[in-house]
C-alpha cells in the first residue's frame, strides 16, 4: 500500500513539472487490460459474372415450323478462373435445340475452350395448329451458387407457320404392261403440275440397257408419259400420281446427255428449300448393250437453292434423264452422297435423329467404269439401321458405286411402314404383310440388291421389281425371271394425309 501511494506521489510530481494540475479534477490511476485481437470474417462472395458473345447466322434466327434449322454460336468473352456453365432456357413446346426438347440445355465452358464458338442448332416444333407467324425467346443464363441466375443475353426465334403437305384427294395410280416404246396414260382428273409428282416402280424383262424406262407427268397435268429406250414389250410399270392441295412445289423436265457428257447442270425456275426437298430421276437410252449399264446410271443432287446437278461416272451412251424436284412443307429432308468403294459391299451415313415411323429413303446411284453392267455391283439397297444411321448395301464388291440419298421424315401426320423381304432363288415373287393402309393414299417405295447365279451382267430381268397392293394389308413384289438369283428388297409404304 505504501508503495502504491509513493507511485501516485511521483506521478503527480511529474505532471506538475510538465503542466499545471487542475485541483478540481480527480485523477484516477487505471491499470489497462490486455488487448484482444479482432478477427473479421468476410461474407460469402459469389463467383464473378461471365459475359458471352452470341453470333446468329445471317444475323437472325428464322425457322420454318417443323423442317428447317438455323444456328448461332456462343462463347465466353474472357478467360474464366474456373469452369463455367451457360444454361439455354427455351420453350420446348415451340422449339427443339441441339435436337433436344429438354430445357434448360447446359453448355459447359472450360479454361481451355472458353473462346471456342459452340454451335447451337434451333428447329421449330410442328404442332399442326394454324397460328400464323410466332416468336419464341431463347434465354441464356448463368447460375451462381446454385441459387440465383443472371441473364447473359437472348435470341429471338422467328417462326413461320406450317400447315404441312395435304393431298388434294386419293392418288391416281395404276399398273400397266407396256406394248409400245412411248405410252401416255390419261388421268381421270387433271392435276396441278406445280403441286404433283409421279413415282414409278419397274419390272424389266431383259437386260439390255435400252429396256430402262422413265415416267413423267406431261406439261398440262393430264397424263403420265411412260417411255423406254427402244424395246418396251412386257415391261411392267406401277405408277402413282401424288397431288397436294397445299404445301408442295414441284419442278420437272428432261435432261439430254450426249454420249460424251458426264454431267448436266440444271437451273431451277424457282428456288427451293433444300431442307424439305428431294429429287426423283429416271433414265433411258437407245443403247442395247447389257455390258455397260453403268453408263446410264445417274445421281442427282441439289448444290444450292436453284441448281440441280445430274452426274454419271462413265460416258459412252446417249441418255435422256427425266427429273423431278419435289419440295414438301410436311417433309424434313436430309441428303448426302455416299460411295461403296472397290472391294466393299456396304457403307453407312449418319443423320440427325428422325422418327422411323414417319420416314423413308429415296436413292439414285451411278456406277464407276469397269462395272461392265454387272447388277450385283450396281444395284444398292438402302435402309435405316436406326434413327441416326443409314446402311447402303450391294452384293458384289468390284469397283465403286456412288449413291445420292434423301432421308425424308414426314412431320405432318404422314405415316410410313417399312421392312425387308427376300426373294428366293426359286421364286419370282415375294409378299409382305403390314398394318392396314388406305391404298388410295399409300405409295410403295423400294430399293434392292441382287445376287447372281447366272451371267452377272444379264440380271436386270431377275433384279427389278413391280410392287402392288394385293389388299390393304399385303404387298406383292414381282420379277420377270428367277434365274437362280436371290434378291433382297427394302420397302416403304408411305401413307400421305
Image (cartoon, rainbow, N blue to C red):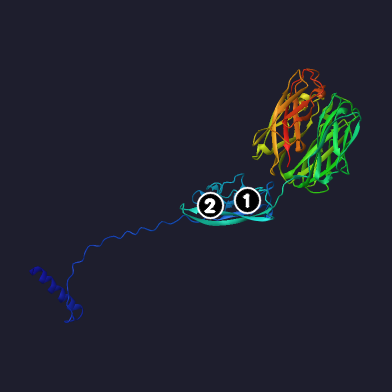
Q: How many marks?
A: 2
Q: Nearer the viewer, residue 41 or 335?
A: 335
The percent coordinates of residue 212 (x first, y second) are 85, 29
Q: Quadrant of the N terminus?
A: bottom left
Q: Quadrant of the C terminus?
A: top right
The answer to whether any part of residue 345 appears in the image is: no
The answer to whether any part of residue 147 appears in the image is: yes
Give SS at disc 1.
loop
Q: Residues within 10 Å of mark 2 (few under 14, many from 20)?
A: some
The percent coordinates of residue 148 (x first, y second) are 48, 55
From the image, tell me which residue sits under label 2.
79
Which mark, by number, is residue 421? none
The answer to whether the residue labelled 1 contacts the one labelled 2, judged by CB atoms less than 8 Å apart, is no
Of the image marks 1 and 2, the number of the one nearer the N terminus? 2
Image quadrant where residue 275 sits? top right
Q: Which numbered mark, 1 or 2, is in the foreground of this view? A: 1
Vertical relation: 210 (above or below) 60:
above
Give me the residue at 53% from left, 55% from top: 50
Which mark, by number, is residue 94? 1
Amino acid at each position: 500500500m505504501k508503495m502504491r501511494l509513493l507511485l501516485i506521489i511521483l506521478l503527480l510530481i511529474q505532471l506538475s513539472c510538465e503542466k499545471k494540475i487542475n485541483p478540481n479534477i480527480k485523477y484516477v490511476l487505471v491499470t489497462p487490460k490486455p488487448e484482444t485481437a479482432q478477427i473479421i470474417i468476410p461474407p460469402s462472395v459469389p463467383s464473378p459474372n461471365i459475359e458471352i458473345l452470341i453470333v446468329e447466322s445471317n444475323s437472325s434466327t428464322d425457322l420454318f415450323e417443323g423442317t428447317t434449322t438455323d444456328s448461332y454460336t456462343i462463347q465466353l468473352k474472357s478467360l474464366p478462373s474456373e469452369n463455367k456453365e451457360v444454361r439455354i432456357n427455351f420453350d420446348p413446346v415451340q422449339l427443339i435445340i441441339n435436337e433436344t426438347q429438354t430445357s434448360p440445355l447446359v453448355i459447359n465452358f472450360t479454361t481451355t475452350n472458353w473462346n471456342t464458338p459452340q454451335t447451337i442448332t434451333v428447329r421449330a416444333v410442328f404442332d399442326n395448329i394454324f397460328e400464323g407467324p410466332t416468336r419464341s425467346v431463347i434465354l441464356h443464363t448463368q447460375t451462381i451458387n446454385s441459387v440465383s441466375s443472371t441473364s447473359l443475353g437472348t435470341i429471338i426465334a422467328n417462326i413461320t407457320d406450317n400447315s404441312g403437305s395435304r393431298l388434294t384427294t386419293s392418288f391416281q395410280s395404276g399398273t400397266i404392261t407396256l406394248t409400245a416404246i412411248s405410252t401416255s396414260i390419261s388421268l381421270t382428273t387433271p392435276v396441278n403440275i406445280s403441286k404433283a409428282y409421279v413415282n414409278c416402280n419397274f419390272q424389266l424383262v431383259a437386260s439390255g440397257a435400252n429396256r430402262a424406262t422413265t415416267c413423267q407427268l406431261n406439261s398440262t397435268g393430264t397424263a403420265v408419259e411412260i417411255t423406254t429406250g427402244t424395246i418396251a414389250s412386257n415391261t411392267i410399270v406401277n405408277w402413282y400420281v401424288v397431288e397436294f392441295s397445299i404445301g408442295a412445289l414441284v419442278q420437272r423436265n428432261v435432261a439430254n446427255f450426249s454420249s460424251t457428257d458426264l454431267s448436266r447442270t440444271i437451273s431451277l425456275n424457282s428456288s427451293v428449300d433444300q431442307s424439305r426437298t428431294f429429287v426423283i430421276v429416271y433414265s433411258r437410252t437407245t443403247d442395247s448393250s447389257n455390258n455397260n449399264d453403268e453408263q446410264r446410271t445417274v445421281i442427282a443432287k441439289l448444290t444450292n437453292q436453284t441448281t440441280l446437278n445430274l452426274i454419271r461416272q462413265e460416258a459412252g451412251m446417249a441418255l435422256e434423264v427425266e427429273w423431278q424436284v419435289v419440295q414438301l412443307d410436311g417433309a424434313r429432308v436430309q441428303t448426302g452422297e455416299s460411295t461403296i468403294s472397290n472391294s466393299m459391299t456396304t457403307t453407312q451415313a449418319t443423320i440427325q435423329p428422325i422418327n422411323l415411323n414417319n420416314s423413308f429413303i429415296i436413292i439414285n446411284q451411278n456406277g464407276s467404269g469397269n462395272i461392265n453392267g454387272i447388277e450385283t455391283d450396281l444395284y444398292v439397297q438402302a435402309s435405316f439401321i436406326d434413327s441416326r444411321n443409314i446402311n447402303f448395301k450391294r452384293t458384289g464388291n468390284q469397283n465403286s458405286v456412288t449413291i445420292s440419298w434423301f432421308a425424308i421424315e414426314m412431320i405432318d401426320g404422314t405415316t410410313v411402314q417399312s421392312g425387308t423381304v427376300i426373294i428366293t432363288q426359286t421364286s419370282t415373287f415375294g409378299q409382305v404383310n403390314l398394318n392396314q393402309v388406305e391404298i388410295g393414299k399409300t405409295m410403295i417405295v423400294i430399293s434392292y440388291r441382287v445376287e447372281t447365279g447366272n451371267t452377272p451382267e444379264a440380271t436386270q430381268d431377275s433384279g427389278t421389281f413391280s410392287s402392288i397392293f394385293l389388299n390393304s394389308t399385303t404387298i406383292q413384289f414381282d420379277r420377270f425371271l428367277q434365274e437362280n438369283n436371290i434378291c433382297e428388297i427394302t420397302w416403304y409404304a408411305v401413307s400421305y394425309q
